Image (tube, helix red, strand yellow):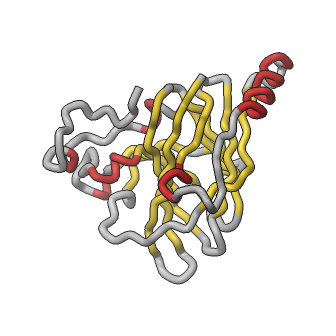
Amino acid sequence: MCCNNMNSIQSWNDLPVAAPIDPRTVVANAFTDATQGVFKRSTTFLQTSWAANPWVFTGLASCTSLHSDDFLEINDAIQWTFSHQIVNPSSTLAIPMRKVMFMRGGTQWEMDITIDFGADTYTDIELTLRDNAATSGDALSTSLGTMPVISFAGNFTGQHSFRVTISQFGRMSMVLLAKDITSSPLYSMFEMEWVVVP
């Protein structure tokens, strides 16, 4: 399944007027550290001015079982992590490939990835599908909310755990939007290409 499967989209003429895709079609649950994401319709997602995003993956990534009472599944998750390299944080890797993550799909698994936010402080973190950023949203009034996202409360700086349970398989282009509040409010996106496998 391709989560950005807007089959009626044939060009940039079509994408801005397409309906955004709800991230819950592919994400069963998500956390940053101990903060559970909350579904909402964002009033801030559609920005017109963007800054570069310095975030990077670290080498810390794993698959864990959500069945904490099932020792066979716990061991299965450990073995899956052992046999799969989830992210490649190497600075010698071509830059476009650094966004690729190999994730395990299925609602019994949780993927745990560490993201380094850098020295600045970020807030208003929102997870959704990348192509939603080119649509006009569900509603034109920003006071009603325009974009379906999974939102994470709090301020983030340095390294943080990003944990997600994925209900679909395939290649998915996802983004984390955030507002940098260290010097002035600047919005940026961290792109992730999820290759979701069994």
Which of 17/90 is in front? 90
Q: For residue 145, say whether it is visible.
A: no
Point out residue 26 in the picture as x, y percentages from the top left corner: 48, 31
| Image-based side of 175 in relation to 154, left or right | left
The answer to whether 184 is drawn above or below residue 23 in the figure is below
**Residue at figure coordinates x 46%, y 60% from the top left:** 189
The answer to which image quadrant residue 122 occupies is bottom right
Q: Is residue 105 above or below residue 89?
A: above
Q: In the picture, which quadrant includes the N terminus?
A: top left
Asked if one can make out residue 190 in the rendered structure from this viewpoint, the answer is yes
Residue at image location 74% in from the left, 31% down from the top: 83
Q: Is 109 situated above or below 18?
A: above
Q: Position of residue 80 (x, y in %)?
A: 73, 28
Residue 31 picture location, percent across and down? 64, 45
**Quarter of image, res 29:** top right
Q: Quadrant of the C terminus?
A: top right
Q: What residue occupies the far bottom of the structure in this picture?
A: 183
Residue at the outermost left position: 13
* Image-based side of 95 in relation to 13, left or right: right
Q: Is residue 40 left or right of residue 92?
A: left
In which quadrant of the rendered view does residue 159 lie? bottom right
